Amino acid sequence: MEFLTGFNAELPRFFEISWFRNLIFTVMLITVLVGLRLILSRLLLRHLETAEERQRWISGSRNTMVLLLILGLAAIWANAIQSFVLSVVALAAAFVIATKELLLCLSGSFLRTTSGAYTLGDRVHWGGVRGDVIDISLLSTTLLEVGPDSAFHMPTGRKIVFPNAKILDTPLFNETQAGKYVVHTMRIPLTSADDLEKAQLVALEAIHEVCQDFLEPARAWMESLEHTHNFVHTPSATPRVYLHIPEPSRVDLLLRFPSPVRRQGRLEQAILRRFLRNYYGSKVPLSVNSNSVESI
């Protein structure tokens, strides 16, 4: 009697526990559904004459019972399911926040692979720095810096490590994607008082003197890009000199010429030396022999 009295006293506390109460209701639901199906089957199967009708009833009643069971369990365990879903969502959100940079780096690596943005050995201009790609991993890319800014093309010996996530939000320029030759542009600042006609002619002559050995191969290479790289408009390899006025009383010469990959810096120096020597004459005592050019 003492046991029954203690059990009756503790029973309401068990029902206050949600999972215990839900478990009791689940057992009751299953018992009611199974019992109801057995009773209906006994009553109806006697009046069904053909095996086809009996099979249809068995299949239909089973599917109905399963559907009612699922709906009943969802109603009984709704709060528990909601709490579980919220916990899973919170855990997933915390995981994403904690590994955001890692996931972005992996996404950037996937984008680089699928788009073919760059490979080992390419020279790229990325996020304000330029360099040759010397290592690529799932999370980062290592460049050997070329510079120290866009006006120079000499390796500095410094390594720059970028997270691959930057490819998702930073424009990347691949200077060696076209292959053997690229079209390079350099700027020579002048004033409006200079002889611009003479300056254009001298600059164009300097380009032809320096680039004469590879003008024809570069032109043929540029024309082949239409088929090998699917270029809609292939860049012209013909040397050009344009005028640009960035501000009053100042005129810039824009020199556009083909160059073998990674020789832009040497060609710039050679062209600039010839231009200064031929345009200003003895006022600028610069040598234009090949030794001095190669040493720069």
Image (cartoon, rainbow, N blue to C red):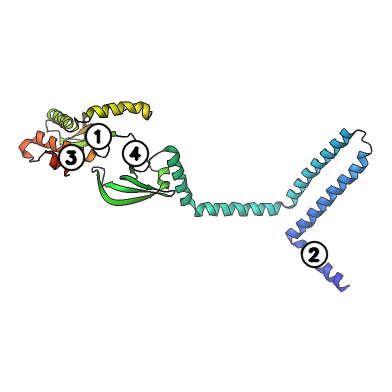
First of labels 3, 2 by sequence position = 2
Q: Nearer the viewer, residue 120 or 271?
A: 120
Residue linked to disc 3: 269
Residue linked to disc 4: 174
Q: Distance between the residues labelled 1 and 4?
A: 15 Å
Residue farthest toward the bottom in the current orientation of the protein: 2
Pinpoint residue 178: horizontal percent, then vertical percent. 33, 34
Asked if marks 1 and 2 touch (Cβ < 8 Å), the reply is no
The quadrant in which the N terminus is found is bottom right
Q: Is residue 119 above or below residue 224?
A: below
Dot label at residue 259 = 1
Q: Mark 2 or mark 4, which is nearer to you? A: 4
Answer left or right for 42 relative to 250: right
Residue linked to disc 2: 12
- As helix, strand or loop, the secondary structure at mark 3 comes to helix
First of labels 1, 2 by sequence position = 2
Please name the residue shown 18% across and 40% down the image: 269
Task: Count numbered badges in the picture.
Answer: 4
Q: Is residue 235 visible?
A: no
Residue 4, by quadrant, is bottom right
Dot label at residue 102 = none
Q: Amino acid under label 3?
A: Gln
Asked if marks 1 and 3 touch (Cβ < 8 Å), the reply is no
Q: Amino acid under label 1?
A: Ser
Please name the residue shown 77% across and 58% down the image: 21
Q: Distance between the residues labelled 3 and 4?
A: 22 Å
Residue 83, by quadrant, is bottom right
Q: Mark 1 or mark 3, which is nearer to you? A: 1
